[in-house]
Image: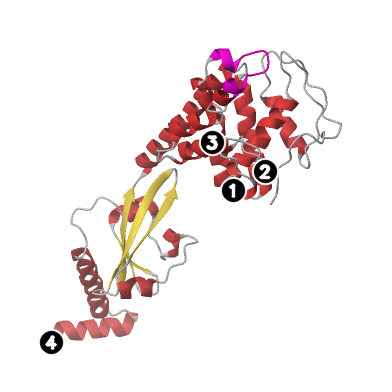
Amino acid sequence: MLLPALLILYSAATNYCAVYHFLKINRQLSRNNYYLSQLPRFNPEPVCIFNDKGQAVFCNSSAEKKFGAFKHLFQITGEELIDPRKLISSENEFTCRYSRNGKHYLFAMIGSIEINSVLAYGFDISEVIETNKGIIDTQKEITYILGEMAESRSMETGSHVKRVAEYSRLLALHYGLSEEEANLLRDASPMHDIGKVAIPDSILNKPGKLTEDEWRIMRQHTEKGYQLFRNSNRPILKTAAIVSYQYHEKWDGSGYPRGFSGEEIHIFGRITAVADVFDALGSDRVYKKAWDLELFDNLDEFIAVRDKFKDYYAAKPEPLVSTLPKEVPRLISA
């Protein structure tokens, strides 16, 4: 009886109830132990538990060490607004990527009816992200190398494919495509003439007019390029297949190889066609001087690209000041 009486007197004097505090600690420890029992043992990755209001009720030591204690589910999900109650009631899984200090984590959040909570498991995917980025960069580099190889066979320069790539990106953005689509087109467009590697030099670089049979063989380069990439599952190469196949089609249906017209022609093919013609007319060649051009709006952006990727033999380009000749095709905004 003496100990409880002393605790009561101490609590009254200090407004501090040791018994209550002790019991509260025990409840917290019990709850944490229960949460831990629901999780994989010896998990070295971050694990957090959030209640049905999205508030953090538990973070393991790895989570606290790497991020500090999360206070709310939205700290992980960012702009992804999810309702914890729906996750819990349906026991569904939701994943999101979380980046901090150069590290990348994939959080898998699983609803648990049993403990009325959302369990968030974190996995370090930094190495995967870097590896994937390296693969994509390698693909981009290869597309430029192959594009330059194809152009060199038809007396073009390596700078031509770089300019066409950047022109295509600018045109795509001004047309209204997303940044992702514009970048994809930029990375694939250097392959627009890749099929020319299968065309004999006697035809490809013939100084005079091609015969009907020679012209038929020349036109096959679009299908040759398409055949190279049509079975690829890589976004860049799939786009290269579209570009190489369709960029010689024309809005009025007079192009090749399929005679597509209007919006039958993929927008990637239309944009690359305009970029290619613009570069051919606006750049110096050993056999001609660059035309003076004016390209609808935002001309300064295109001039900057042309000046950045000059041909090694090109003289200093003259200012683009006059109007665009009527014969030059414009991008159809339809």
Q: Position of residue 234 (x, y in %)?
A: 42, 39
Label 2 vs 4, first from the N-terminus: 4
Q: Which circle marks residue 109 in the picture?
A: none
Dot 2, crowdedness within 10 Å: few (<14), some or many (≥20)?
A: some
Judged from this view, the residue extending furthest toward the front is: 212
Query: Relative to residue 277, is residue 76 depicted above or below?
Result: below
Name the residue carrying label 2: 251
Classify residue 65 as left or right of residue 236: left
Name the residue carrying label 3: 245
Task: Name which quarter of the figure residue 167 lies in.
Answer: top right
> Is label 2 or label 4 in front?
2
Residues at badges 1 and 3 in contact (C-beta under 8 Å)?
no
Residues at marks 1 and 3, CA–CA distance in whole angstroms? 13 Å
Dot 3, crowdedness within 10 Å: few (<14), some or many (≥20)?
A: many
Q: Position of residue 320 (x, y in %)?
A: 82, 29
Magenta-colored span: 201-215
Q: Identity of the amino acid at label 2?
A: Trp
Q: Which circle marks residue 264 in the picture?
A: 1
Name the residue carrying label 4: 1
Based on the picture, tell me whether residue 212 belongs to the magenta stretch: yes
